């Protein structure tokens, strides 16, 4: 039984909360690189409940500052991004990407404020097509970003999209850990979704196993970065069909895909307690993505979502995700188009912060139960024992993939897959 | 003087409140029958502050369940209504209309959850063109629905509409009890609204009495179902013009109409403390409604309102009820079209929950004062003495009508009308 | 350092707050005269957090009453404005402009309520194209309105507009006191804004001084009505360029304009703690405004704003004030059109109520610091010592103007300007 107190600890990420402190120890993406151009418009950023503004300066460096000018708290979103600094429009105070004030044009030249004024600024880095932020204590800033596989491919091999989700980040992550829902929420009645290669080398339709055995058993294998989830389905008298997903602390996942197809991962980034960004990254380790693949991702029919200029999906909470009851009867399980939007419909439908004390969990929730316990323990041992959070010390362990495989029943799946899914560093 | 504490007791209907407990002992309509079709889309229902979902199963039976799946609280509104059950889209858990889980397709076949899981489900019935719900203790469920006259006519003799009202239910009921406002709020300067037959058999325009004597005196006659309100106006030296309305516990009314015309009643059903459904039922005991009458009701010019697909009136709070100040000067008292919308303009205008401690009541508020006292007493004696609420034991007493009549000053109006307005059961 | 407690005192104006009590001792404008016509539609008014309704009766007098009928609290905005009274649409209770009930048509003729019932009514006056209200204790009502110069010119010499501002009134006033921001927020790169006459009689472009010396020093000169702010810029080795603004208690300002052009003043009227009306008054003491001037003010390119029928600017918070980043790069400092809208962008951007305890003030904030101290002292001495607030006793002192001038460095600017800017009463 998950208590309301535990639910509070799990979900709240504002300044000073246990989970907020935990998140602040990790590097997380907060913008897609293309959202900022040198000397271009600043962007509003909200992260873990803090109001910030981001800009890319004349040298291409990204600043992530307090939203409000130190002087009289005008909104720096309206600021001028000029010559390596962001200038407030009210009285022209200008800041560099470290938050240091560079000019106070309305104050005397010898103003002591020139040395004193500094606004909150967080370090940023850029890799894998996204911009990362670290909001924790500066002396504890991890030297290396988590080395995701999708950061180690050329830009042509990768597609990153994001969408606004109107729910707490944790119920979004839980959807990503929950391999069991795929057989239901994402089921289609008419089309083939994915394929898997048998050990004899034949292409087999994934739905065969997914629909035939809707009761997978789940096995958790803890790792340096988080854990692997093995969803085991009966394929035949002698074989299991395994789908292996990855959870990477604190809120990254990689979901299994068919052989030969791009791999897909997610990051859920808390905007505040009631909204989060869902980043979706598809990449192919060995080849550029095709034009068809880019079009598919942009079109939102699959795991990426079609969004407006503010990254809000066209199909959303306010229009019941454009549910089509006729489609629900005849074509798919939900009447909703797109894997990402289907996920949103159940995750947002629970309310902004689901009350986990009201749940009835089953065997299919194994990964979720483990994850909740690890997250709460992580937040608590950070608070009480200042223990370095999971994964921080081993950024290179993050370079893993996901996969699906048919194996003999007695094979050691995690051993086999750990090697198969973790490409060596060059 | 009505205190703020009394106002809280009168208005709040959420789970565990005194008035909420009282309402939960009655059957009340919550949907129009045509809103649900067999195996069709589920409908969101909110009743006394509880979030529910309704569906009509393959056998035509109506289920009224908790909005949230027992498992991980996905919204069952998005569920699949299939083969006598509502199935959650997240992991396929399926419930019947009693709330019992029928299938747990992601759990092992021998899962103990299969016997244990049950979500909140409330009994429903169907009569009079609407679907009724009972949300109280199951051992106290009244065997018979209140036997309204409009349930005893063929469907062709009846028209039921509903509209969303953005105010507490009680200020809506009070509008229904308040015969005195008809001379003002609903006054038109140019047209004839209703007619009444004199005892000599002549048709007389209602406005003659209504406008001539704007100061009716009110008399209350308590009954097994609630009370009759007699509004007495002076018609001549020897005669009174009486309009008799009915209040039927807890929130039903029947308003007087002219002879020969359909009778109209209301039900105000609390959605939560700040919104309610206003059902309007017009019926003729003896003949089908005419095409003109149906058109009039649908058009919203009279007591029924023209609404959008969510039953929100086109003229509403956000557009000042489409008030036309020129019309207000020349054609009617409000510049607002439609009796129902005129009512909304004053009842919503008070704010979501009017502060009754600020009122100055007059003689015209006699019925309202009595009603408030009875409702609060009912809620309190239910709580303290577990006394069966008014009307529950006498469902057949609800078969009454309303009327208007000219009588000699010394006639016993309630005796005469009680016989005239209560048709015997066949 | 300004504390959070001081910030609460400064900003809150609801009934019973120290600053609310202070404001209630002054006459302030609440409508433009043309918003009300005799026997025309009532207008909703919200002032210092109180819900009111205004109407102009058959004799042209303006009533400002409680929004809610004394009887059952129907909204008098929907009322009938008829024959020297406002009549509630619910039961026809009718009030005159003093709040006295005139008719109770649904009550007996001898009802004691007829003598007893009275709703809150506040005195109003009309002058200078606006309607003024006094919400304080009636025995302390100032006999004379503050005698602004713009009340002493014919209507043809004056233009009054207003716009809704979605921020606390105090951060709006502070923008008006803050002469220093003009060099930044309102800077244009391409066009000439204003001109000033040198003592030799030559027209000089204001931007020369404004842009050349962006670090004016500020001097405060206290007066009977508030204070004068002298912003001193270096013009040459021997001369200063002075711009003199006026603050007139509690929330009026007059800003400097170029010689020969109309003068402009503001009033910020608290609607509640999070919104205010910004009135802008431009007038010429000696001649009618030209057609071009009226068009300019209505077009909203300068200090007046282009608004919708509810006086909300077309460029507002929800559309980021129509910011154009290309314009911001090339044409002006903000990319936002119009002085008034530029002000709104910074003042609303701070949030509804800015947290002044987070500020870092500089020398350019001299006037603001003085003003805050005077306002808080005024509120506190009113509360503790019942001291008559600043300016109340000297309404004729309010007849002052603003101005800009070039003076020798040793000239006594306040002495010179006090005479120049305060026209004698006729």
Image (cartoon, coloured by chain):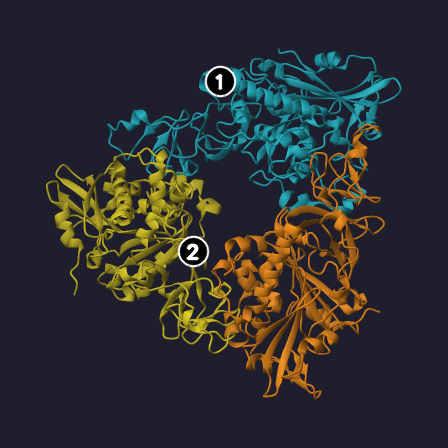
Chain colours: A yellow, B cyan, C orange
What's the residue at 47%, 62% (across, down)?
A68
At which x and y percent is residue B173? 64, 29
Q: Which residue is mark 2?
A: A307
At which x and y percent is residue C304? 66, 66
At which x and y percent is residue A290? 30, 62
Badges 1 and 2: C-beta atoms under 8 Å apart? no
* Disc number for residue B141: 1
User: Residue C182 is drawn in which quadrant?
Assistant: bottom right
Q: Chain of mark 1?
A: B
User: Could you say which is closer to the camera, residue C244 or residue C277?
Assistant: C244
User: Residue C184 is drawn in which quadrant?
Assistant: bottom right
Query: Crowdedness of circle 2 by 10 Å Cα count: few (<14), some, many (20+)?
Result: some
Q: Residue furthest right?
A: B237
Left or right position of B77 against C156:
left
Q: How many discs appear?
A: 2
Left or right position of B102 against B401:
left
C199, above or below C151, in the image: below
Label 1 and label 2: CA atoms lie apart by 49 Å
User: Could you say which is closer to the camera, residue C385 or residue B398?
Assistant: C385
At which x and y percent is residue C66? 71, 43
* Disc number for residue B34: none
* Quadrant including the C terminus of chain A: bottom left
> Mark 1 falls on what kind of element?
loop
* Quadrant including the N terminus of chain A: top left
Q: Chain of mark 2?
A: A
Is residue C289 visible in this depiction of the protein? yes
Query: Crowdedness of circle 1 by 10 Å Cα count: few (<14), some, many (20+)?
Result: some
B398, above or below C230, in the image: above
């Amino acid at each position: 039984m998950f208590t309301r107190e535990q639910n509070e600890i799990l979900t709240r990420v504002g300044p000073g909360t246990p989970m907020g402190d935990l998140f602040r120890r990790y590097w997380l993406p907060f913008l897609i690189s293309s959202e900022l151009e040198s000397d271009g418009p600043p962007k509003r950023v909200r992260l873990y409940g803090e109001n910030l503004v981001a800009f890319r300066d004349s040298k291409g460096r990204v600043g992530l500052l307090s939203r409000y000018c130190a002087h009289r708290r005008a909104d720096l979103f309206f600021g001028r991004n000029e010559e390596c600094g962001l200038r407030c429009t009210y009285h022209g105070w200008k800041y560099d990407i470290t938050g240091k004030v560079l000019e106070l044009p309305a104050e005397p030249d010898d103003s002591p404020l020139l040395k004193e004024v500094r606004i909150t600024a967080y370090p940023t880095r850029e890799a894998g097509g996204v911009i990362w932020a670290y909001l924790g204590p500066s002396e504890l800033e991890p030297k290396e970003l988590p080395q995701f596989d999708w950061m180690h491919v050329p830009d042509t091999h990768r597609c990153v999209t994001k969408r606004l989700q109107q729910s707490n980040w944790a119920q979004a992550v839980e959807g990503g850990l929950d391999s069991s829902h795929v057989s239901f929420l994402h089921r289609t009645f008419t089309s083939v979704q994915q394929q898997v290669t048998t050990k004899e080398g034949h292409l087999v339709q994934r739905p065969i196993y997914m629909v035939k055995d809707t009761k997978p058993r789940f096995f958790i294998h803890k790792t340096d970065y988080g854990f692997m989830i093995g969803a085991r389905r009966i394929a035949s008298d002698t074989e299991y069909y395994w789908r292996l997903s990855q959870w990477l602390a604190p809120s990254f996942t990689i979901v299994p895909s068919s052989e030969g197809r791009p791999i897909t991962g997610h990051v859920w980034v808390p905007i505040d307690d009631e909204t989060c960004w869902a980043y979706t990254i598809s990449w192919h380790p060995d080849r550029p993505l095709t034009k068809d693949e880019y079009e598919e991702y942009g079109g939102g029919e699959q795991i990426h979502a079609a969004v407006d200029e503010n990254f809000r999906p066209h199909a959303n909470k306010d229009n019941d995700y454009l549910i089509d009851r006729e489609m629900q009867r005849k074509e798919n399980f939900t009447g909703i188009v797109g894997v990402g939007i289907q996920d949103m419909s159940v995750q947002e439908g629970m309310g902004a912060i689901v009350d986990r004390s009201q749940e009835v969990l089953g065997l299919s929730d194994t990964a979720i139960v483990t994850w909740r316990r690890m997250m709460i323990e992580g937040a608590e041992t950070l608070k009480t024992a200042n223990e370095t959070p999971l994964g921080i010390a081993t950024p290179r362990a993050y370079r893993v993939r996901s996969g699906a495989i048919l194996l003999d029943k007695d094979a050691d799946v995690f051993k086999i897959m750990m090697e198969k899914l973790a490409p060596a560093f060059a």
